[in-house]
Image (cartoon, rainbow, N blue to C red):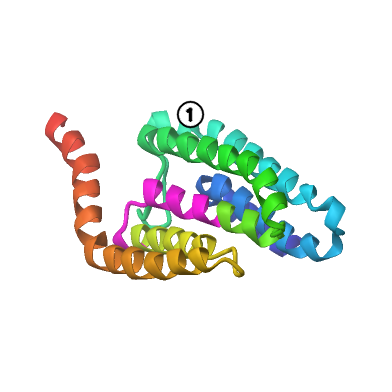
Amino acid sequence: MNSALNAFRSFMQQGGGGLLLPEMMLVLFAMGILLTDYLLEARDKYFNALMAMLGVIFSAITLWQLRPAAASGQAIGFSNSLLVDPFFLFFGFVFLIATALVILLSVRYLQIEDENHGEYYALILFAAVGMMFMASGFDLVVQFLGLETMAISFYVLAGFLRRDRRSNERARASWHTDFRFSTAWAPRRTSAHLAARCLPARIWK
């Protein structure tokens, strides 16, 4: 038990795990929503939205705590595949604010549509994780994984209303457009993104 705790502490402090805390908070709360949703009765489904908002808040707190590391320019981990810098902090807060607004607007909407399931909020958090990986990824694989995580979550959310024909058509259209676009354009977008972040530093040096 002590060896496992020591390994986890070493990973968080030296292995770059601390850079993943904002994403880890979102994933943990999303998994918690999936586990507790089946234990809730219909009148208690608002607890899922509360859990999702807590996940966003804790993620924002850990993101705020990364400011000193981002300012020092030493926040690079996982074999130089993940970078925490002011660029990531800005877009991370943008993504979290947008996620919080979507959660607040979805509570009443799901009640009206009678589709108040915890999977909806978990997918929103997973989509936010994908977007944050796209903003912090310093490697093509990380960028692509973030893009696919976001695209899959959006695809399922587009067809979440299973009894609505228009929702099913939107999901089908999302599948054809998002995945073709991501597969074809991810390398180009990633190359341009990395060039924009690396070239200025090299020029000023």
State left or right for residue 23 relative to residue 2.
left
Residue 52 position, x and y percent, is: 67, 47
Identify the residue at image location x=45%, y=58%: 150
Residue 15: in sight, yes or no? Answer: no
| Stretch of the chain drawn in magenta | 126-141
Is residue 139 inside the magenta stretch? Answer: yes
Numbered marks: total: 1
State left or right for residue 167 relative to residue 186.
right
193 versus 94 height, above or below:
below
Q: Which image quarter holds the N terminus?
A: bottom right
Q: Nearer the viewer, residue 7 or 57?
A: 57
Q: Amino acid at mark 1?
A: Pro
Q: Which image quarter holds the C terminus?
A: top left
**Dominant secondary structure of the residues highlighted in magenta in the image:** helix
Q: Nearer the viewer, residue 29 or 83?
A: 29
Q: Secondary structure at mark 1?
A: helix
Is residue 104 inside the magenta stretch? Answer: no
Residue 21 position, x and y percent, is: 57, 46
Q: Nearer the viewer, residue 124 or 22?
A: 124
Residue 203: in sight, yes or no? Answer: yes
85 versus 135 height, above or below:
above
Which residue is under mark 1? 68
Residue 141 position, x and y percent, is: 34, 64
State left or right for residue 42 relative to residue 72.
right
Query: Badge 1: few (under 14), some or many (20 or more) residues near its Cα, within 10 Å?
Result: few
Identify the residue at image location x=29%, y=69%: 180
